[in-house]
Image (cartoon, rainbow, N blue to C red):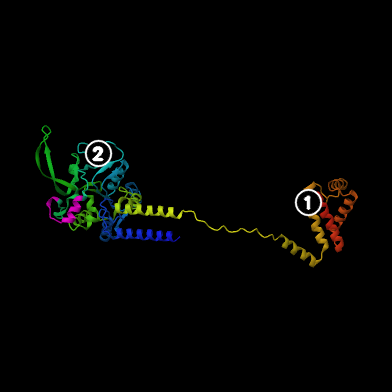
Amino acid sequence: MKLNRGFVIFVVLFIAFVALTQFLQPKTFVWKPSFHPKDRQPLGAFVFDSVMHQTVGSRYTVEHKSFYQLNHDGTKAARSFLVVTTDFKYNENDLKQMKALLQKGNNIMLVMSGTTSTFNEDDTLSISQESQFSKEFGVDIHGMSPFQLSNIKELLKSRVNDSNRYDTIRWTGIPQKFPKARYITESTLTANDTLEFSEKQRKSWEVLSWINVNAQVYDDVSGSITWEGYTRATIAAQRKYGRGELIVVSTPLLFTNYGILNRQSNLYVMRLMSLIADRPIVRTTSYMETDEQYVASQSPTRELLERPPLRIALWIVLIGILLFFIFTARRRQRAIPTITKPANHNLRFIRMIGSLFYQKHRNGDLIEKRWYLFADDVQRLTGLDVTDTADNEHTFSALSHKTGIPKDKIDSIIRELRIASVYEGNITDDDMQRLIKAMNDITERLT
């Protein structure tokens, strides 16, 4: 037993040591874009939503509703709707509800790095093929440069002013509202995702901001570069649609905790938000990862399995528990307790009942109760009913045959017992003992 106790103490102390070591290690950030209102990681939206709440107040809300639900929630006042996601997945009904909201005078700001249609397999993001979103609104997003975590890490470690790591966002300016301005931000947050306008609806769009991106022109025959330089690429634009306005922004990573805490990019984000802040703002999370998916991604089990040190600690705990089961599963000899036979209290009960009858001295009642028990025993053993006076001849003859007692004696005993069982007067002790003895004698002969 002492060995097991020492083993348990060792395992507990070892687990505590591993947990304390992991707890004291520097925490690493998770650079995964989620835009979730509860995510406090750099690319979550907890700080972003908090800043918007403090800036706009109660007129800024976050809801998990689709455009259909927002269009049919019974609100008649004009609102602004904000969608922030890396990939805006839409269907035909979403486009229909967006157009209906814009026709009613609502504003919609789509902050995304791409669109994916869920009702048309041929709907891609290539420049050569126009998507359904572009057909409806005249704009698409191309580039789809992946988020480079290494660039952010190098930038945070070195803090060297390398021009290749930064982009300059140029605000074109809106007359009588916002003047022209420049905002410097990390290039990995813009990711070179730019807006591409369709030829038919290009004039409907007003460019809000743009950046310079590297461009190359190839000779289709030789495959060599014929021109290389910088070209202007739009990253935010707006257009009138019905009585409302549609604003498309291709830099969703700026609308995160990291982006809103950056001194340069947050000014640009706040300028964009000012375009829709003249009315209540509803940020819908229906077109991004759901709450269930976010909770699953943040579950402790997932964290343990994804991080090598925690995964090793988990294996150590499981192995320790297995060893604990092996050591404590050994067979142990224990004394088998002696099982005593339960005491028979029937005799005590009989004596108590007998003493009560003796104290009351009601012999008639005692004979009456014994007579009914005797009649039940006879009927159970022979099928004869000694209380039935209609067939005495057959009853007495059969009972005499089964017990060996003369018929005339059976006749006299049964008749006397019938009278005694209903007699209201007192019966002597001798008669009581004689009648009870006669009934016991008959019962013993039948058994």
Picture coordinates of residue 180, whole percent (x, y) = 13, 54
Q: Which mark lies nearer to you, 2 or 1?
A: 1
Question: Would you place residue 262 above or below residue 197 in this image?
Answer: below
Q: Main secondary structure of the magenta part?
A: helix
Question: Would you place residue 418 above or below residue 224 in this image?
Answer: below
* Residue drawn at 52 percent across, 56 percent down: 333
Q: Please report the bounds of the magenta region as a residue range.
A: 150-164
Picture coordinates of residue 385, whole percent (x, y) = 81, 49
* Residue where numbered disc 1 is placed: 377
Pick the residue in front: 391 or 374.
374
Question: Would you place residue 220 above or below residue 388 in this image?
Answer: above
- Which residue, as the protein is rendered here, is positioned at the far bottom? 359
Q: 10 Å neighbourhood of mark 1: few (<14), some, or many (≥20)?
A: some
Amino acid marked by disc 2: Thr
Amino acid marked by disc 1: Asp
Picture coordinates of residue 336, whole percent (x, y) = 57, 57
* Residue drawn at 80 percent across, 60 percent down: 366
* Residue where numbered disc 2 is placed: 124
- In space, the residues marked 2 and 1 are separated at their CA atoms by 97 Å
- Which residue, as the protein is rendered here, is positioned at the far right? 408
Label 2 or label 1, whichever comes before in sequence order:
2
- Which residue, as the protein is rendered here, is positioned at the far left? 226
Based on the picture, tell me whether residue 157 belongs to the magenta stretch.
Answer: yes
Helix, strand or loop for disc 1: helix
Based on the picture, tell me whether residue 275 belongs to the magenta stretch.
Answer: no
Residue 300 makes an appearance in the image: no
Residue 375 makes an appearance in the image: yes
